[in-house]
Amino acid sequence: MRVSPEESFREYVSGRLAAWSRVAFLLTGDHHQAEDLVQVTLVRVARHWERLSARGEPDAYVRRALYSQHVSLWRRRWRDVDLRADPPERTSADTTGDVETAVMVRQALGRLTRRQRAVLVLRFFEDLTEVAAAEALGCSVSTVKSTVREALARLRTHAPELAELAGSTNGRHG
């Protein structure tokens, strides 16, 4: 029995929603903005689903749509306005290393521009090559390389605690 395009789309979203939501959160740094980004992206994908599903694996298209939607915010007038407030300090007893690391990384990503966050998430969270990241963002490989270099330099300056973290995790895995 042939699955309808609507059912096929529902199955795809069901299987990939958590992954796309994590990526969107890393890009935006805000749960509500991440939900909006995923929703807008999936609406765009739904319009082309029958063609995309017929071609096979739609992840590349969804990734490009997600990042393009995020990047398009750079071009809006209010792109430099950060509407997010810093999250309140946690007062609970949960101060495990994983939580501290996650907060530290989230705060560090919040210090970057949208473009820098997008490139770092593509390269280091999604583990894409420079070529694949450039394709996802619709820019040149040299733009990806220079943006990674600028973002890492900015992190070294504004988030030196991550260098200490990287040194300690290298020792654990090495």
Image (spheres, rainbow, N blue to C red):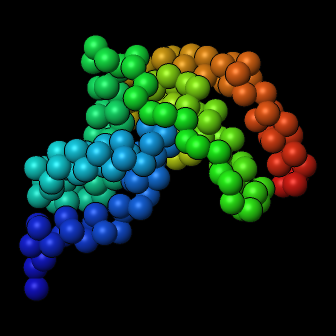
Q: Residue furthest bottom?
A: 1
Residue at x 54%, y 19% (from the top left corner):
147
**Residue 9, picture quadrant:** bottom left
Residue 25 shown left or right of residue 171 in the figure: left
Residue at x 57%, y 16% (from the top left corner):
146
Q: Is residue 126 among what the camera can see?
A: yes
Above or below — where is 37 with respect to 4?
Answer: above
Q: Which residue is nearer to you in this view: 84 or 15? A: 84
Residue at x 25%, y 50% (from the top left corner):
39
Q: Which residue is nearer to you in this view: 141 or 107? A: 107
Q: Which residue is nearer to you in this view: 93 or 119? A: 93
**Residue 6, picture quadrant:** bottom left
Residue 101 shown left or right of residue 110 in the figure: right
What quarter of the picture does the N terminus occupy? bottom left
Residue 122 shown left or right of residue 88 in the figure: left
Above or below — where is 16 with respect to 62?
Answer: below
